[in-house]
């Protein structure tokens, strides 16, 4: 198990099945850039600072602060693998 990657700090049951894994990238997002990257792939609100999309059957929520929630995942390891796949696509939206 990959402990502490993405500062995983919450694992709780998801109402739609599986688990919700809450983690953090350690830096926030430019919502303007993130919404442009995700255009047509999900829902994104610059004003609210939140983006939501599905990837490989999992629901992913990204917050302006850098928090990420993965819903309906089977384990923390599965969530980390999914986040590893997503990160290269969205990393240009990170604020240094």
Image (spheres, helix red, strand yellow):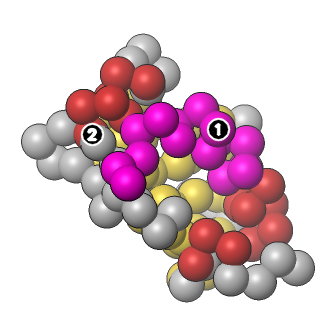
Q: Answer whether residue 56 is magenta in the image.
A: no
- Looking at the rendered image, the quarter that the C terminus falls into is bottom left
Q: Check the image and report above or below for 43 versus 9.
A: above
- Residue at the location (24% across, 31% down)? 32
Q: Which element type, helix, strand or loop, lies under badge 2?
A: helix
Q: Check the image and report above or below for 4 versus 69.
A: below
Please provide the residue range marked out in magenta: 82-96
Q: Answer whether residue 86 is magenta in the image.
A: yes
Q: Position of residue 45 (x, y in %)?
A: 22, 37
What residue sits right under mark 1 in the picture?
88
- Disc 2 packing (10 Å; few <14; some 14–19; many ≥20): many
State which quadrant residue 31 falls in: top left
The mark that comes first in sequence, 2 or 1, is 2
Q: Position of residue 89 (x, y in %)?
A: 59, 32
- Residue at the location (69% across, 74% down)? 5
Q: Which element type, helix, strand or loop, lies under badge 1?
A: helix
State which quadrant residue 40 falls in: top left
State which quadrant residue 18 falls in: bottom right
Q: Position of residue 91 (x, y in %)?
A: 53, 41
Q: Check the image and report above or below for 49 versus 15.
A: above
Instruction: Indicate left or right for 7 with 29 as reference.
Output: right
Q: Position of residue 44 (x, y in %)?
A: 30, 34
Farthest residue to the right: give it: 1
- Residue at the location (88% across, 79% down)? 1
Q: Check the image and report above or below for 67 versus 42.
A: below
Image disc number at residue 31: 2
Q: Alpha carbon of mark 2 to alpha carbon of mark 1: how far?
A: 16 Å
Q: Nearer the viewer, residue 12 or 8?
A: 8
Q: Is residue 37 visible in the rendered structure shown here?
A: yes
- Disc 1 packing (10 Å; few <14; some 14–19; many ≥20): few
């Amino acid at each position: 198990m990959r402990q502490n990657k993405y500062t995983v700090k919450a694992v709780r049951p998801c109402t739609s099945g599986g688990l919700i894994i809450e983690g953090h990238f350690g830096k926030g997002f430019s919502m303007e850039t993130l919404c442009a990257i995700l255009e047509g792939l999900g829902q994104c609100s610059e004003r609210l600072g939140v983006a939501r999309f599905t990837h490989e059957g999992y629901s992913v929520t990204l917050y302006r602060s850098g928090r990420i929630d993965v819903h309906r995942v089977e384990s923390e390891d599965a969530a980390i693998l999914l986040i590893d796949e997503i990160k290269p696509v969205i990393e240009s939206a990170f604020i240094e």
